[in-house]
């Protein structure tokens, strides 16, 4: 308990320094705790590359975790050694890797989509429509700011998406009108926050220092703000954040069940459906790659 408390305190400091999310910190600490329990009673500084290889191979062979889960554990241990213990670890190439399965994505037909959307309403329905209309990831959609919506060009700007890259994607005209009406209601919420003199919305550290007071401006306000206020973990400041992912995930799960679909569809299925339907319409694969924000076209090719 004592050593984990010290590691947790230092991890929190490094996370703020590197502008990592609180969720990433919690995930890394959970993996570090599992590794230390596995190698107990050894202290972290006493662990060698062999101990780490044994733990990562154990995850693949005994626990049969996915390749993504094993990589997450690896990144957590890398974070521990490089950023907290100030040590470099090498020679992990011989770790037994988890098998990376090649599976086709779940895709909904247009008729199935209509059935699901029939059982969604309000903001949940609008968010789902934006995700399907532009092929967004859920987190990308929830992190949209007012300034990222360009109604004149019918496009959305995705800031710091996967791989910390910016990109543009489409905003269908059918969704645009409903989004405009939604933003009128959101503007009223923004004005209410200003009258109560609340702290502005969260802005990345460097930008917050460069654009003092930008967090209180309408252009930086969330497109999909939460109706409840939150306390910032590091500073204790009360702010308004965007909607939590589980809000739509639960509503979408219920909508799929009510629609009577046998497919295991999630919110991410909307992104898969967007890409597949564009391929079916004959759109160029490179264009679809750009809209989805894939670094490698081979990732996009799975939709063919």
Image (tube, rainbow, N blue to C red):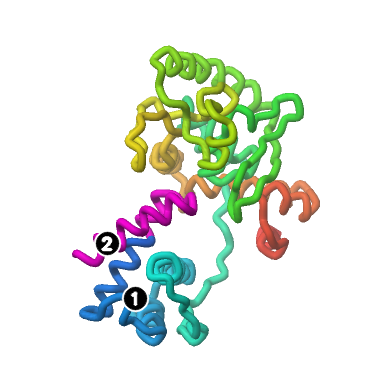
Task: Determine the residue positioned at 28% across, 67% down.
Answer: 33
Prevalent SS, magenta region: helix
Q: Across the whole image, how many numbered discs are drawn on residues?
A: 2
Q: Position of residue 247 (x, y in %)?
A: 40, 37
User: Pointer 1: residues within 10 angstroms few (<14), some, or many (20+)?
Assistant: few
In the image: residue 211, left or right of residue 5:
right
Question: Which residues fall within the magenta stretch?
Answer: 1-27
- Kindly state the secondary structure of the residue where label 2 is placed: helix
Q: Are marks 1 and 2 in contact (CB under 8 Å)?
A: no
183 or 171, which lies in front?
Answer: 183
Res. 248 image quadrant = top left
> Residue 302's image quarter?
bottom right
Residue at image point 27% right, 62% down: 6
Residue 11 in magenta? yes
Q: Earlier in the sequence, mark 1 or mark 2?
A: 2
Q: Is residue 133 left or right of residue 44?
A: right
Query: Is 47 a magenta residue?
Result: no
Marks 1 and 2, how far apart at CA: 28 Å
Residue 7 image position (x, y, % from top left) = 31, 63
Find residue 171 and name its label. Answer: none
Q: Relative to 32, does residue 133 appear above or below in the rendering?
A: above
Q: Which residue is mark 2?
A: 6
**At numbered mark 1, what does the secondary structure look like: helix, strand or loop?**
loop
Task: Check disc 1 and report the residue beneath it.
Answer: 63
Identify which residue, 180 or 112, lies in the foreground. Answer: 180
Q: Which residue is painted at 72% across and 61% down in the image?
A: 297
Percent of width and height locating residue 17: 46, 52
């Amino acid at each position: 308990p004592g050593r984990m408390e010290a590691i947790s305190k230092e991890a929190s400091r490094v996370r703020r320094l590197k502008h990592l999310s609180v969720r990433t910190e919690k995930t890394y600490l959970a993996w570090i705790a599992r590794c230390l329990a596995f190698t107990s009673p050894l202290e972290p500084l006493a662990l060698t590359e062999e101990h780490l290889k044994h733990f990562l191979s154990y995850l693949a062979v005994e626990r049969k975790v996915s390749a993504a889960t094993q990589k997450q554990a690896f990144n957590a241990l890398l974070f521990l050694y490089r950023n907290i213990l100030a040590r470099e670890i090498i020679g992990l190439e011989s770790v037994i890797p988890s098998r990376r399965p090649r599976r086709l994505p779940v895709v909904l037909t247009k008729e199935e989509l209509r059935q699901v959307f029939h059982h969604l309403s309000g903001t949940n329905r609008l968010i789902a429509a934006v995700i399907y209309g532009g092929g967004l990831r859920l987190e990308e959609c929830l992190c949209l700011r007012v300034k990222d919506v360009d109604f004149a060009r019918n496009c959305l700007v995705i800031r710091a998406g996967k791989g910390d890259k910016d990109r543009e994607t489409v905003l269908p005209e059918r969704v645009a009108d409903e989004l405009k009406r939604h933003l009128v209601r959101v503007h009223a919420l923004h004005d209410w926050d200003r009258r109560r003199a609340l702290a502005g919305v969260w802005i990345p550290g460097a930008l917050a220092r460069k654009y003092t007071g930008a967090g209180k401006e309408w252009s930086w306000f969330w497109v999909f703000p939460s109706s409840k206020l939150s306390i910032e973990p590091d500073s204790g400041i009360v702010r308004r954040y965007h909607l939590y992912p589980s809000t739509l995930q639960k509503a979408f799960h219920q909508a799929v069940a009510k629609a009577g679909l046998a497919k295991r569809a999630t919110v991410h299925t909307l992104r898969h459906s967007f890409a597949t339907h564009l391929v079916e319409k004959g759109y160029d694969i490179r264009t679809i790659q750009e809209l989805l924000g894939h670094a490698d076209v081979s990732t996009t090719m799975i939709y063919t």
